[in-house]
Structures are given as structure tokens and as C-alpha cells.
Amino acid sequence: MRTTTPRRWRSGTEPSNARSDLKLRYLLSLTFTPLFAISTVVFAVWAANSPSYGAPSSGTLTGFAVAMGLLTLFAVVDLVVVIRRRRTEL
């Protein structure tokens, strides 16, 4: 039979009042969204112009372009969320 330790209750109000640093998230999203977008374009153009026998291969470069595109999408969504939250909370 397995015994478990009882859960501890939090005594403070931190879980119900926790907030993220919206200014920092806004700054990071604003900084990295164009950086990721530019790197997506660079990797896509490099993959399109690279020979099939070269190193790195065009498949690898395409993978990097897709990864950068996903990071761009994530940064844009985070930027939109932060802007909406800043309008309602501040």
C-alpha cells in the first residue's frame, strides 16, 4: 500500500493574485517578433537558393525556416495577448 503525504495549503494570497510582468513580455515580444520574422525569410530564401548537394542541405534549412516561422507566430500571439491584457489591466 502506498502512502502519500498530505497536501500543504498555501497561507498567502500569491496564487490568486499572481501576475506576470507585462512590460517585460511586451518588450521581449516586440523585440523578437521582427527578429524571428527576418530569420524566417532568410532561412527560406537560403533554402530556396541552396543546391541539393550542399551543406547544410535544403531540407535542414527548410526545417529552420519552419521553426523560425513557428517562433514568429508564437511571438505575435504573445504580443497580441499582452496588448489586450495591458488595455484591460492598466
Image (cartoon, helix red, strand yellow):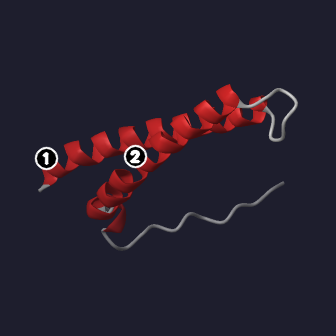
Residue 57 drawn above or below residue 19: above
Q: Which of marks 1 and 2 is nearer the N terminus?
A: 2
* Helix, strand or loop status at disc 1: helix
Q: In this view, does 49 lie to the left or right of 74?
A: right
- Residue 44 spot, x, y in % from top left: 60, 31
- Residue 8 spot, x, y in % from top left: 52, 68
Viewer-closest of 18 and 54? 54
Q: In percent of the image, x 30 and y 42: which residue is there?
A: 81
Viewer-closest of 37 and 13? 37
* Helix, strand or loop status at disc 2: helix
Q: In percent of the image, x 60 and y 64: which residue is there?
A: 6
Quadrant containing the C terminus in the rendered view: bottom left
Residue 42 drawn above or below residue 2: above
**Of labels 1 and 2, the one closer to you:** 2
Mark 2 highlights which residue?
Answer: 34
Quadrant containing the N terminus in the rendered view: bottom right
- Residue 76 spot, x, y in % from top left: 37, 39
Q: In percent of the image, x 26 and y 62: which residue is there?
A: 23
Q: In percent of the image, x 88 and y 30: which residue is there?
A: 53
Locate residue 57: give its quadrant.
top right
User: What's the mark number on residue 8?
Assistant: none
**Circle 2 crowding by C-alpha within 10 Å: few under 14, some 14–19, many from 20:** some
- Residue 77 spot, x, y in % from top left: 37, 38
Mark 1 highlights which residue?
Answer: 88
Rounded to the nearest angstrom, the CA distance separating label 1 from label 2 is 25 Å
Q: At label 1, which amino acid type do we have?
A: Thr
Q: At label 2, which amino acid type do we have?
A: Pro
Q: Is residue 54 left or right of residue 48?
A: right
**Circle 1 crowding by C-alpha within 10 Å: few under 14, some 14–19, many from 20:** few
